[in-house]
Amino acid sequence: MRQWQQLVYVMFLCIFSSIAYAGMYGSSLCKEEGYHCVKIKRSQSWRSLWPDDHDRDIVMRVNRMNTQLYPGLRIAVPDDLPEADIMDFAPFPNQIESTNEKLIVVDPVERAWGAYDASGMLVRWGPVSAGSDWCRDLDEPCHTHDGSYRIFTLGSSSCYSTKFPLPDGGAPMPYCMYFNNGQALHGEPNGLPGYNASHGCVRLYVNDAEWLRYDFVEGPNADNDYRGTQVIVKPYE
């Protein structure tokens, strides 16, 4: 490779890395009080860095990630990690005005979801990856639509997309919970990279999706006047 080609290649990598890091949720916490950041080295993984299940789960959720680590990535770590509780890091208020029904809030800016019981108490939260600013395969924006919706269809662990990947679909969407046409909450085992990257669905940790599906969400039925659990998607700004 010629010297000028090497220079262009290095510049491209620097620009690409800067853009990628700028969109990563965890990197925004590096200078926040109560956090410090570690720079990932070759061959390091979530498990090798944080072998304790409690510690690893909190670090992953704080960074809104479940994808593989790679060299150069900066990961935010709470200073009081061993004593921390995941609810301490919730980006939602612990109590909201009661609506006398369950509520799920999705915030694409915070890359997070929160579940409120009928009394307005936050009972659980977790990371998300919502719709991307631009989908290259569709050649158009693919944000998750903001607004108020209702869960209208519930799926099992075998739920899958009938559209993506193009052209025939087949992508796993375990524990899918559709709320707006083709947009759904669903589990994604390795698809939360710390930024919004989906085609419009709301990707969750698989265990979070399973909990929502079977322990929190209600589909339309006679007991709720055929109005499934409410989902509020906040704007991207």
Image (tube, grey):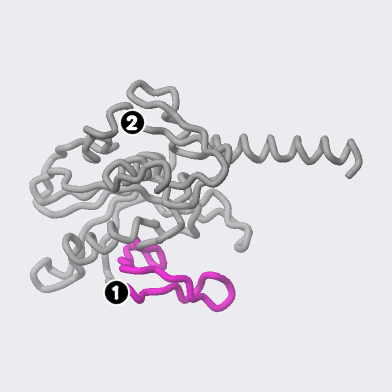
Which range is magenta? 157-186
Task: Kindly identify the residue that appears in the image at 45 percent across and 58 percent down.
Answer: 190
The quarter of the rendered structure image containing the N terminus is top right
Q: How many marks?
A: 2
Q: Main secondary structure of the magenta part?
A: loop
- In the picture provided, is 123 more to the left or to the right than 73? left
Q: Position of residue 201 (x, y in %)?
A: 42, 60
Task: Kindly identify the residue that appears in the image at 34 percent across and 50 percent down.
Answer: 233
Task: Kindly identify the residue that appears in the image at 40 percent across and 44 percent down.
Answer: 64
Q: Quadrant of residue 218?
A: bottom left
Q: Is residue 160 magenta?
A: yes
The quarter of the rendered structure image containing the C terminus is top left
The residue singled out by tag 1 in the image is: 156
Viewer-nearest residue: 32 or 103: 32
The residue singled out by tag 2 in the image is: 78
Q: Which disc, if any, is residue 14?
A: none
The tag earlier along the polypeptide, 1 or 2, is 2
Viewer-nearest residue: 161 or 178: 161
